[in-house]
Image (cartoon, helix red, strand yellow):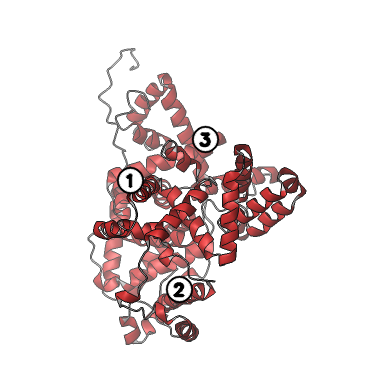
Amino acid sequence: MDQDGIHTPAAQPSWNTRVKDNRPELEALERDAELMLRVRDGDQASFGLLLERHRGPVIHFLYRMVQRQAVAEELAQEVFLRVYKSRGTYEPSAKFTTWLFRIATHLGLNWIRDGRTECRQASLDEETVEGATRQVADRTRSVEQELVHRAKLKEVRRAIECLPSKQRAAVLMHKYDEMEYTEIANVLRCSESAVKSLLFRAYEHLRSRLAHMA
Amino acid sequence: MRLSWSNVVSAVLMVCLVLSWARVAEGRPGPKNGKTPIDEFLRMSPAEQQQALNRLPPEKRRRLEERLERFNQLPRGQQQTLRNMYDRLNQLPPERQQAVRKSLNQFSQQPPERRQAMRQELRSMAPLDPQEREGRMASAEFRERFSEKEQRIVRDMSGLLPVR
Amino acid sequence: MGCPIGDDGGDELILAYGARTLAPQQQVELERHLESCASCREMAEAQRTVWSALDAWSPATVSWNFDERLFRRIENEEQKAWWRRLLPVSWSWRPAVPVAAACAALIAAFLLKSPALFFPETSSDSQPKLEIEQVEHALDDMDMLKQLGLESAADKAQTMGKI
């Protein structure tokens, strides 16, 4: 209803569109391709710039995939090494980030496949020791709040770890890298409907495990 | 795990190693390739099967064909379980095989409720490892539940259970 | 979802709602729907909880020498002999040689013990023919073993009435 109390029938809702301002992203995409073409032509400094821009997201994605910081960094190094080694044949046919995450996902999935045990408690305990030295506790929280926060975090990590690996990759890209279905589909080399199916199942699982945290 | 040629070569050679050990460690040759005479018969061509069956008198042949049909109709899982137990039986030294077959005969002659009790005991022992099974059969409870004859039958049958 | 929007991309809508990426107009429409649809409301609340919970998971800081290590690896790769670069995988003789020697010795010992496995006699006359009596005895054994009743519960259900 408008301010005069007149009810205006709503336009037919479009259920399937997400409205975002894509302009800064498009500029960034073009920049990535431009930088990579310069790397192809021998400009190492451009590789440094790409590394600077994408190091964090790749490592963080891999960290959430494998839940081990050291392994994530090792895999991330492999990702950038492959990017560098492929510079000679680079063509900007796909988005740079799609290519990057495709390599990262492939390495992450391989690592999980080769060393996976379902819902390992041990890996979470290891990481608690490893992570404690890396993650700075939030000093605004009391000790009790910090303990509650860590317990919550453990549950979240466990819930993610229990997802099948492809669902895990899809959720992480959707949630933390804010990728659209199309891009996730390009990374995973599957259809958009397959991505939706992966995400819906993954979130359903996460809701069942984490909804009590409200 | 990154695959390298050396990993592949090592893996193949380790497999050869394991297979060699397995073969050397075998006490005696068991059924060929884990197949029973029943399986061998069923794999023969119809002509060869007929040739083999022709050696039997008609009534015996008919009964044998019925039994083969019944075995073939069993679920795959049950067939495999039976094959595995058959393999284990035939792996035993001849004198042990004779003793176990004797116990199997004696088992079939026990009253139904006693057969059931022994079956239940064997089922509960199936998931245990050999040491645990020995412990169970040495326990006072086991000795109280079963007569000496039944204890011997269960002990002999336990040798046919899968090794955990 | 059992409601009007369930069949029309409702899951997708709820995910977007949980992620707070819906356009304002869509959000208003969805929230109006949620007021009357308990199942969607429950799902939307749960999805928002999940989203917030996932927000709490911030990754650790990257090692200070990540770039340095990467560049060192790149340098090592570049300095590899040209012929090693031609091979798609790295090759090392070291682990394979002692294992190969040990296996060769074992296989030789095995061959001496059981040559028949590697050199089977091909003559059909030397293969023992399957005697029908063997089949009978095997069936006798199977019948006795069957009475032990050690098959799985599923198998048992299927065999009721087949014997």
Residue A183 lies, in percent from the top left, at 30, 50
Q: Tag 3: residue type?
A: Ala
Vertical side of A115 occupied by A206: above or below:
above
On whether disc 2 and disc 1 are found on a single subunit, the reply is no
Q: Residue at x 77, y 48 (%)?
A: B140
List the residue tagged with mark 2: B15
Q: Residues within 10 Å of mark 3 (few under 14, many from 20)?
A: some
Check contact, mark 1 vs mark 3: CB within 8 A. no
Q: Secondary structure at mark 3?
A: helix
| Mark 1, secondary structure of its residue | helix
Q: Which residue is mark 3?
A: A211
Q: Is residue A48 visible?
A: no
Q: Position of residue A37 (x, y in %)?
A: 26, 68
Q: Position of residue A110 (x, y in %)?
A: 41, 61
Q: Measuring 35% from the left and 16% from the top, which residue is drawn there?
A: A3
> In what element is the residue under mark 2?
helix
Quadrant in which residue A13 is drawn: top left
Give the quarter of the image for residue A28.
bottom left
Say which mark, if any, is on residue A195: 1
- Above/below status of B7 relative to C42: below
Amino acid at pointer 2: Val
